[in-house]
């Protein structure tokens, strides 16, 4: 491992590398590292693996000649799509479209999906302002090339950040980074657009105990959204509002269905696009294909962006966001057909193996277990929250957050943190109740080890870890008891 | 074809779609459409296919289990790279690194490569301004999250545009789009950064006839670069200068080696990064792996970005552009290992089949042929220019540009346009002299048809097209004589 680090270190900044993986030996919910250690993975490559490692359906996805050809003949999809592309868009992407949406564009990654959703919002906003006219003035054409108004208008996209918590994460390209409000280190030294930021609710848990306080949060934050619209109307009118159904990198911050319903009303009234960023929440981990389905919105969001578990980037949209001219939402590749070959298999498995149901079932086991642990360790953890297996809890301090992630790793679990003092669970959709039990057992052991900050003594707890839980098809060396503490563990928000 | 268009039209803006492809039947330099027509492809998916269609080396790239696993276990490369990733970076990407560069980051596409090169430039610029200090003030941390200085400083990236021609193209995400100066339609309605734009030389051809005038162009444009540095120094200091070795989308605008040498000197003196955007020129089409190798720069450029034919995005960089902290040049996927599986094969084929030599050889045939044609049709075409097979010529009017591309298509050739009145050639690296001869023959026929704007009469020229040239391993229906004229042909700059 150290040797690999030495090699990569000569070629790039690799301080973020936690472990080198053995992807031949990784299987299902288990990640194998290059040293032969095996980890139960509840982080799954920053929440981007729908079916864990080496799922047979994916290993077999490229058995046919036609799939291999989709892989090696990557077209400029916007110009020369394959003859089966319309079918794929329809049968794969539209088969899981958010209720009410029937249009979709493919992209490369989450950031570029959000960037292009912004563009769609700006285009519709400006087209409306022109009274529907789809031609441009000479001045607009000229100033667009100079990056100044009216051709490049001073418009904005609104995003969210809680008063005391870390905020939105929508990507790191310059457009999306302007709306990202998670950590300063993501943004330092980069010029940006000064755009409106509205308050995101900060709930107290358990929700049923703090109903009044949390409703008050919703109210104040919605009022703040209105304020922001007013404040920026003269300066840089807001063409769109982007929001995650659950602010993930920001600390798994939730808002109620009522909050989202009201937000949609405000956007409609203000003529701004409501962009739901489902990059991390989409594709099932909350128990529904799209997290915003939990919100019972009276009409679909204007734009819904996706990536990660969907394997391809892209966005669904209402027909009014079809651009009046071609080539305005465009790039060379416009996605990658080989990702749809895999996504088609993923969706098939989700349906035939009823994985959304499994997510609900496993999620219940996980959440109940976490609630027990917060009762058992009230000084260490609290605020268990989430939907499906998209769960999180807060811990007492940022230091404890680091220690928990590190100790989990030493105990054989790859976990993730987010926000300032949150531990997040992002298992694959194939995470079963038995994996949940195993995780809870290791988490309990970890909390015990760290309780009262007494020095961890791994060996004495080794028997806590029930090896029989490890899936029998895993051929890897099953030694999750790494005692070295070599890797620094920076937070890998992405 | 019409039916496919009807289906896709219900799902997205598809005005840019020219043809639906049959990628099973496409082979080598020949593109097969869904109706069974075959085209000699000198456009190759907006210049993104290194080895044409269905090259055996690529079809066989995923024969081994380990390659399939690289495909289906896509990691967060910045956190959990596979144990063979350091080797791949070294043996694949560094094996073709521009002379003098030994560091590389992978990305997803050209735009995101350029966005991240900008970030690297901004980070080094700010670190230097801090006297090398790698910590931040409270104020910087706070203002970065607010998108305002000093944390989000008012810095700029300089790009280029000729006085009378179309300009730079560096991508369509919000950061890169600010430096893109090709067409207004790419930029209209999007807020942007007001950043410096320097003049790009506008040469007269043939070069040897206009030596004095062209040197004068260089001189004036370099003076303009200096002026821009001065002008923006107070307002938004320039941290980097991005330039294509050949402005491709802008109209295949060239600048001399001397221009680039002087530009590098200016950047060094001004403390700004020189970013060479080799997204379209990289990976061999000019006869060298990297086009800037033709410029004999005394030291390597600071950053060299790539994508398209390289199959993966990314950038090479000098070691001083290693960020002082991890996670500042970062995203979830950081590229895609499966693209390196293919790139490894591409590089092997380039080397074993001496494709750079072939590019030179074929390029000579093509260029000589184009020169003959400009002598034969002086009122229609002129200014033949380029390196290797990365060639172009101007035509009399934008209308003629459209007509030539359309008529070429009817005659069995997929060609591309760029700039205002330029036809560009972007064949794959496997384009041989025989394909060049075939192309020249069809171009000659096309020019004859259009000469004097007399109505084209396709049938009478059918015998001009020598079928024996078509590669025998092509099993497709060989009927390139499409008489329908169904598709609109927007310019697909990307």
Image: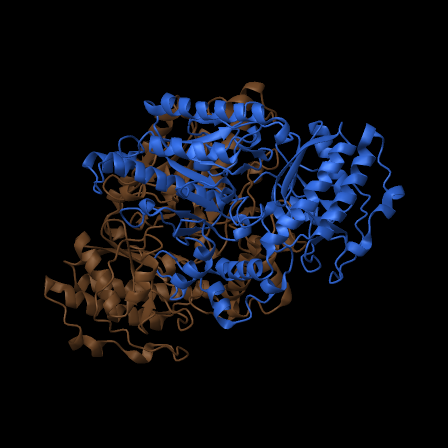
Chain colours: A brown, B blue
Q: Give the x, y percent position of residue B84.
A: 40, 66
Residue with the most extreme right position: B460
B232 or A69, which is in the foreground? Answer: B232
Q: Is residue A172 visible?
A: yes
B53 or A388, which is in the foreground? Answer: B53
* The quadrant where residue A6 appears: bottom left
Q: In the displayed structure, would residue A439 be above or below residue A326?
A: below
Q: Give the x, y percent position of residue A416.
A: 30, 58
Give the residue at x 31% y 51%.
A252
Q: In the displayed structure, would residue A94 be above or below residue B132?
A: below
Q: Give the x, y percent position of residue B241.
A: 42, 34
- Left or right of B16 in this view: B39: right
- Left or right of A436 in this view: B462: right
- Left or right of B222 in this view: A330: right
Give the residue at x 22% y 76%.
A464
Quadrant showing the N terminus of chain A: bottom left
């Amino acid at each position: 491992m150290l040797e690999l680090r030495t090699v990569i270190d000569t070629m790039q900044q690799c301080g973020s590398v936690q472990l080198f993986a053995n992807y031949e030996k990784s299987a299902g919910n288990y990640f194998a590292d290059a040293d032969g250690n095996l980890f139960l993975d509840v982080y799954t490559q920053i929440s981007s693996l729908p079916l864990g490692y080496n799922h047979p359906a994916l290993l077999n996805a490229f058995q046919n000649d036609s799939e291999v050809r989709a892989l090696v003949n990557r077209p400029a999809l916007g110009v020369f799509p394959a003859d089966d592309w319309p079918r794929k868009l329809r049968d794969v992407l539209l088969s899981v479209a958010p209720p009410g949406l029937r249009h979709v564009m493919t992209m490369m990654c989450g950031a570029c999906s959000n960037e292009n959703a912004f563009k769609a919002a700006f285009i519709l906003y400006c087209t409306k302002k022109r009274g529907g006219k789809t031609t441009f003035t000479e001045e607009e054409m000229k100033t667009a090339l100079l990056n100044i108004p009216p051709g490049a208008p001073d418009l904005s996209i609104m995003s969210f950040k809680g008063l005391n918590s870390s905020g939105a994460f929508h990507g790191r390209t310059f457009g999306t980074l302007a709306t990202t409000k998670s950590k300063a280190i993501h943004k330092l030294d980069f010029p940006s657009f000064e755009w409106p930021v509205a308050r995101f609710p900060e709930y107290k848990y358990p929700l049923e105990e703090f109903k009044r306080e949390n409703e008050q949060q919703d109210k104040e934050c919605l009022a703040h959204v209105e304020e922001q619209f007013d404040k920026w109307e003269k300066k840089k009118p807001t063409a769109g509002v982007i929001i995650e159904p659950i602010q993930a990198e920001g600390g798994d911050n939730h808002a109620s269905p009522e909050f989202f319903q009201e937000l949609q009303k405000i956007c409609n009234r203000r003529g701004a696009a409501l962009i739901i960023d489902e990059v991390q929440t989409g594709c099932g981990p909350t128990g529904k294909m799209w997290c915003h389905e939990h919100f019972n919105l009276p009409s679909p969001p204007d734009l819904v962006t996706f990536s990660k578990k969907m394997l391809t980037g892209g966005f669904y949209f209402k027909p009014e966001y079809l651009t009046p001219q071609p080539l305005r939402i465009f790039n060379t590749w416009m996605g990658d057909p080989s990702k749809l070959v895999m996504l088609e298999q993923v969706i098939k498995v989700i349906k035939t193996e009823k994985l959304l149901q499994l997510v609900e079932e496993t999620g219940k086991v996980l959440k109940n277990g976490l609630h027990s642990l917060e009762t058992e360790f009230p000084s260490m953890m609290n605020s268990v929250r989430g939907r499906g297996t998209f769960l999180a809890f807060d811990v007492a301090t940022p230091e404890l957050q680091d220690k928990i992630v590190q100790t989990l790793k030493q105990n054989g679990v790859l976990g993730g943190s987010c926000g300032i003092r949150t531990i997040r669970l992002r298992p694959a959709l194939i995470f079963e109740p038995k994996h949940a039990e195993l995780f809870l057992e290791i988490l309990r052991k970890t909390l015990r080890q760290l309780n009262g900050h007494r020095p961890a003594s791994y060996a004495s707890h080794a028997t806590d870890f029930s090896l029989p839980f490890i899936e029998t098809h895993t051929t890897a060396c099953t030694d999750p008891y790494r005692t070295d503490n070599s890797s620094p563990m920076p937070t890998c928000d992405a």
